[in-house]
Structure formats: C-alpha cells, structure tokens
Image (cartoon, coloured by chain):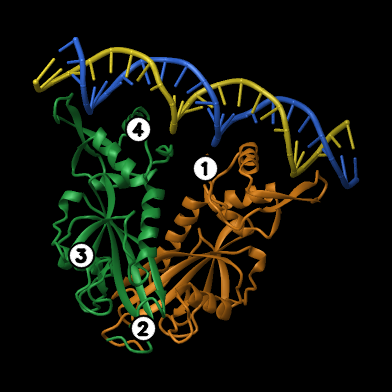
Chain colours: A green, B orange, C blue, D yellow
Amino acid sequence: MPNEMTAISTVDAVVLSILEGELKVLLHCRPVQPYEGSWALPGGFIRVDEDADAESAIRRILKDKAGVTGLYLEQLATYSGPDRDPRGWSISIAHLALVPGAKLAIDEGKAALVSIDDLPKLPFDHGKIIKDAVARLRGKGAYSTLPASFLGKNFTLTEMQSAYETALGTRVDSSSFRRKVLSLGILTDTGRSRQGDNRRPAKVYRLTKAVGTFDRTLGHSAG
Amino acid sequence: MPNEMTAISTVDAVVLSILEGELKVLLHCRPVQPYEGSWALPGGFIRVDEDADAESAIRRILKDKAGVTGLYLEQLATYSGPDRDPRGWSISIAHLALVPGAKLAIDEGKAALVSIDDLPKLPFDHGKIIKDAVARLRGKGAYSTLPASFLGKNFTLTEMQSAYETALGTRVDSSSFRRKVLSLGILTDTGRSRQGDNRRPAKVYRLTKAVGTFDRTLGHSAG
DNA sequence: TCAATAGTGTCTGTCAGACATTATTAC
DNA sequence: GTAATAATGTCTGACAGACACTATTGA
C-alpha cells in the first residue's frame, strides 16, 4: 500500500477508435473514490505481485474493465507529481491504444466512446493526456501505418483513406493516397472484392506487416 | 521506503554530448549497492517530499551528481518490471538530455563521457535505454533543431552541420544543409564572424527559437 | 441510359542530392 | 600567386497535390 514516502504507481490508457466518422476516446465511469461517478480514462494501480511490466498492467486493466483485448498499444508518456492525484504523489504511465470501433463492447453507463471534440472536463490530468495522445497519433500517423489499426484485418483503399483522414483530421487526395500507399508495398492484395450499394466493387487489401513507418509522408492539405 | 507491495520509483538520464567528433554518453561510477563500482547511467530515487515531478527529480540528481544544469531535457520512456532492479519491482522514468561537450565538468573516476560505439556492459537495462535514446535523437534530429543543443549559443553553419552529422550518424551535403536551414528561418544572423586558422571567416548564427521541429526533413545520405 | 463509387493518367511546383563554381581569408 | 574553408549556383530526379479522366457496378 502507498504511504507518505513512496509514489503511487498507476497506468492509464487513451483508447482511441473511429465511430461514425469521428475520432473517439474510451472513457469509463469511475466506480470508486476519488472522483467516484466521474468519467475518466480507464486505468488503475500496478500490481507488483502479478504484472510483468507497465504494459502488462494496462492490458490486464483494459481486459477486466472494458473487455478490450488484442489492440495496438504503445507507451505514450509518464505523468507525475504531488497534486495530480488527491491520494498523494503519483506516477501514471500513460499508454496510447488504437482499436477498430466495432471491436469495443461498450457496457452502457459504465463506459462510453466520446468524440475528442466534445470531451467533458476530466479529473486528474486526463484532459492533458488525451491531448498528448491525439498529438502523437496525428504526428506519427502521417508517416506510419498507425491509422490502419482503426480498421479490421481486411479493408478497401477507400476505407483506409477514410481512417487516415479521420485520424489525421485532414483531407487527403485519393489519387496521391493510392499512389503512395500502393508504391510502399505495405499492402497485400487479398484477391477479393467488396461491394456496397449500387456501385463499383473495391479491391480488398490487408497490411503486409503489422505496424510500420515509412520514410515519405502523407499529405497535410487542410480539409 | 519501498516494500514488497509497491514499486520502486526512480529516474534516469541519458546525457548525450559531442566530444572529439563523436557522440558520447555520460556514465557515472555507482558509489552504492547494487552494482557498486559499476559504470551506469546517472539516476536515483524520486523524493516525494521535494520533487515537483519526474523531470524535477532528474534535474536535481544531475545537478548533484554531475554538476550539470541548463541542458535540454525531454522524457524518453518508462521502463518497468520485477527483474530490472535487484531491489524489487521498479519503475524508471528515463530522460534524454543533450548538452554541449564543453559544458560538462567531468570529475575523473566518478564520471566519464563514453562513445556510444564503445560502451561497456551496463547494469539494469541501461544498455537498452541508451539504444532507445540514440534512436530518438536520430529519428527526431532529422526534422528538428534538437542537434543544435550540442552547440553553444552561437555557432557557424559549418559547426551546426558537423553537429547534425555526428548526431545523425550520416553525412549531409553542405549546399543542401545551408539552403534548408537558412530557408526555414530558424537562425538569426548575429552579424559577427568567426575565423579559424588560415581560412575564410564564417558568419555566426544563433537559434531564433529554443528547440523546434520543421516539416521538411534533412538528408539521409550515407557517409 | 444514369448515378455512384473505384481507380488511372498526367501536369506542375517544390525540394533534396549532387556537384561545379565563386568568395574571402592568411601566407 | 597557393591553400583552405565559406558560401553560392544550377541541374536533375523524385514526388506530392491537383484534377481531369476512365472503369465497373446496379437499376
């Protein structure tokens, strides 16, 4: 148990997803003090008797609290100080997670996906952490396959472009996007097609490798 | 004091500098257990009764242990787990610091600047932390003024180019470097010149702003 | 045929890399 | 003048952005 001489060690996660064409973050309703009943980022204490490291801790918590598994996860930054948590001098190792919208099983009242443009005031420094997470996504998204983590295993180029546009918050020219993405060799043609309503079917691709970076950048043109 | 139920909270710093044209890291000789007498990264416990946050903690330690102040400092990543420190489940919030070589007052026997290509085997996971720090510098250096932190306040373009080349580990074409750097408006002409031995004097510049990023990249041509 | 979306062709401006050239100092 | 380094000029290939164009489906 924490005491006056040691820091409280916690982990938090900014779980981002795309739903209804908007970038959203997973918030959960805190069941215990402090800030009981407030919406906040999912997180909790590191358990030194069972967690292999901070990433294991946040994976355990996301699985228990939100039923989320198998998502893309990377460390974001660590927030610390005497005042950010009323329980005492605390450390939060914050993580960024990306997950396809459909994969989240939201338990109404306990959890919610909230648009990042429509956030309530959040306890701790969770507002700042979310801001940093979105900045990381937008900074890294332009030269990596990070935004593809919002998609399922298979997707069309139009779907991929849409995920990039929502993730980056900018419009992208479809010709440039296709040319770039196809020339990079990061996609594998599945040989299948998918058709929506009343239009030409689109080829279905999947990522050749999990998540990687490329040297060239995607566009920055404003919408 | 740490006990079996809480994590040990520490901070470490990878202090990089350029000396003799090589990228070097500051190591200090551990005066206490564990690994007493081994060379390791400077670091220590967070003191919840005096530190405002992790960055304050590492600044305090660098000042006390190595007499280093006023350096560029950013958070790198946080390393954690039950096995990385023999004293128990530990957290280390690692930082990346850049400092001009001349600014370091090295106390022989207690501290040393060691070339990153010639590192001894280090305790804890300090080898991995240094590797990550250099990767961060090389990744971020190509599109930011980070490597300028290795220089003093005033410098010539040739000195700046040399700092970039050492920091990035690549050669850069001087014409391209000058064109890019001058067109970005990140430098202010001091109006002064500096002359070495037997050659044309070079204009002296300083950074217009502290440390910033730019959208375009510097070259990646191999040396 | 039309509507709608998927996908291609091509022009143009920007810019990094390469490298030749000129400028300024000490001797 | 030479040697050495600072600084500039210029050509070229790569590529992003723009946008016109063609292709494939259902109705």
Report which residue position mark 4 lands on: A177
What kind of element bears circle 3?
A: helix
**Which of pointers 2 and 4 lies earlier in the amino acid sequence?**
2
Asked if labels 2 and 4 share a chain, the reply is yes
Dot 4, how many residues are within 10 Å of its Cα: few (below 14), some (14-19), or many (20+)? some
Asked if labels 2 and 1 share a chain, the reply is no
Asked if labels 3 and 2 share a chain, the reply is yes
Q: Which amino acid does label 4 sit on?
A: Phe
Q: Mark 4 lies on which chain?
A: A
Report which residue position mark 2 lands on: A88
Q: Which amino acid does label 2 sit on?
A: Gly
Q: Residue A62 carries which label?
A: 3
Q: Is residue A76 above or below residue A33?
A: above
Query: Mark 1 or mark 4: which is in front?
Result: 4
What kind of element bears circle 1?
A: loop
Residue at the spot x=18%, y=43% of the render?
A153
**Which of pointers 3 and 2 lies earlier in the amino acid sequence?**
3
In percent of width and height, residue C12 lies at 52, 20
- Whole-number angstrom distance, CA of label 2 to CA of label 1: 43 Å
What kind of element bears circle 2?
A: loop
Query: Mark 3 or mark 2: which is in front?
Result: 2
Query: Mark 2 or mark 1: which is in front?
Result: 2
C17 or A54: nearer the eye? Answer: A54
Picture quarter with the N terminus of chain B: bottom left
Report which residue position mark 1 lands on: B217
Q: Mark 1 lies on which chain?
A: B
Q: Which chain carries label 3?
A: A
Dot 2, how many residues are within 10 Å of its Cα: few (below 14), some (14-19), or many (20+)? some
